[in-house]
Amino acid sequence: MNIYYEQGIVLKEENYSLLIDPVGYPSFKPDIILISHAHRDHYNMKVLKSFPQVLKLMSPVTRIFLDKKRNLPNVLELAEGQEVHLNKLIIRAHEAGHVLGSLQYEIILKNKRIVYTGDFNLQARLVLKPAKVIEADILIIEATYGHPRYSFPERITIYRQILECTKQLIDLGYRVNVLGRTLGTAQELTTLLSFSRLNLYPAVHPIIARINRIYELYGENLGTYRILSLKQSNNNGENPIIMPLSSKISEKKNSIICTGWALNKREKGYVPLSSHADFKQLVRYARQSSPEKVFTVYGFTNVLADFLKNEYSFDAQPLK
Ligand SMILES: [Zn+2]
């Protein structure tokens, strides 16, 4: 079996090939395409459309996010816990705990169990269920925060930090912006702030509200909040405001910026709230999955592979 990276993760066995999370055009026509979740760094609609005959697997929620009008041909929706038996292989979908609809894939091909984690999270959060570790013969694991520098505090500590910081800024008379990634962290922030006992009156940016609605349709209770009116005159003193991470913020002193990359920042106002596994979780996943071979993909691939090799004697290497 041949596993490598070419515009996406490629699994080839004789003349059969799988392409996972493609972001560009590969030099071959795959037999099947798998999409793990609806973040832009894991799919490319033009590429998906360029393979109308090829079967494309994704969760029903991921399909809502990237193909709402259901124009994309040959899509097979696979929810967590479901499996599909195809010609030469079995594919099982497992919860990844990263964003709504995010999947890990377990692929059984030629008596080998190959697990691709996608982006995942093992910690219990206010939203979604955490991922479970899947045992693998060959593990393809994300390495976004695959550097020991990125070890996040306990979730409860991070939540407390966000709430305390919000309260302090409101008490100082500020209208507070809390920034997080639109799909993933923003829903966790909505839940945290709307259910807090601080008597807050939160509002969310309309782009976030649209995604919140889909979370709610799938049974996540994000609490009570307003949708921010983009007309200044319609604002009724909602505070704090949950905004996309990409928002242009003129004043940083009234902002709380939530991202795992916060650990690189020394300034106040950055909080390491992320929908990704941190370094400790990545290592825990690899150890519990107990594979004979590990490939690391995305982010700190070299650092994580070296760590797994040197500290735990894994046969580990970056996917190239
Ligand atoms: Zn992601």
Image: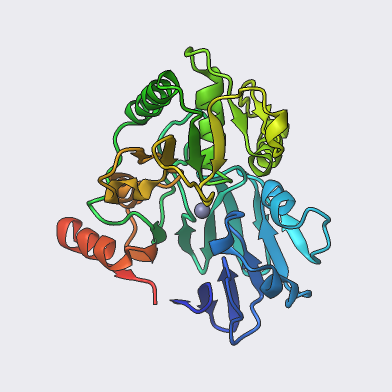
Nearer to us in this view, 152 or 224: 224
Identity of the residue furthest to the bottom in this view: 27
Residue nearer the viewer, 76 or 306:
306
Q: Tell me which residue sits at (35%, 38%) in the image.
A: 269
Depth order, front residue of 81/168:
168
- Taking depth in this image into account, of 204 and 7 the one nearest to the observer is 204
Judge whether 167 appears above or below 38 on screen. Answer: above
42 to the left or right of 283: right
| 92 displayed left or right of 143 | right
The x and y percentages for residue 185 are: 51, 40
Quarter holding residue 255 = top left
Total numbered labels placed on residues in the image? 0
In the picture as drawn, the residue positioned furthest to the left comes out as 310
- Which residue is at 59% across, 52% downward? 92
Q: Is residue 10 above or below residue 258?
A: below
Q: Is residue 314 visible?
A: no
Could you say where residue 316 lies in the image, as x and y percent from the top left?
28, 66
- The quarter of the rendered structure image containing the C terminus is bottom left
Can you give x and y, in whole percent of width and height, for residue 297 in the image? 40, 65
- How was this image coloured? rainbow
Lateral position of residue 67 relative to residue 110, left or right:
right
Q: Is residue 291 left or right of residue 199?
A: left
Indicate the quadrant where residue 75 lies.
Answer: bottom right
The answer to whether residue 156 of the structure is visible from this angle is: yes
Q: Position of residue 265 (x, y in %)?
A: 29, 48
Residue furthest to the front: 233
Position of 105 relative to 262 (above/below): below
Which residue: 66% across, 70% down? Answer: 32
Taking 106 as reference, is 10 above or below it? Answer: below
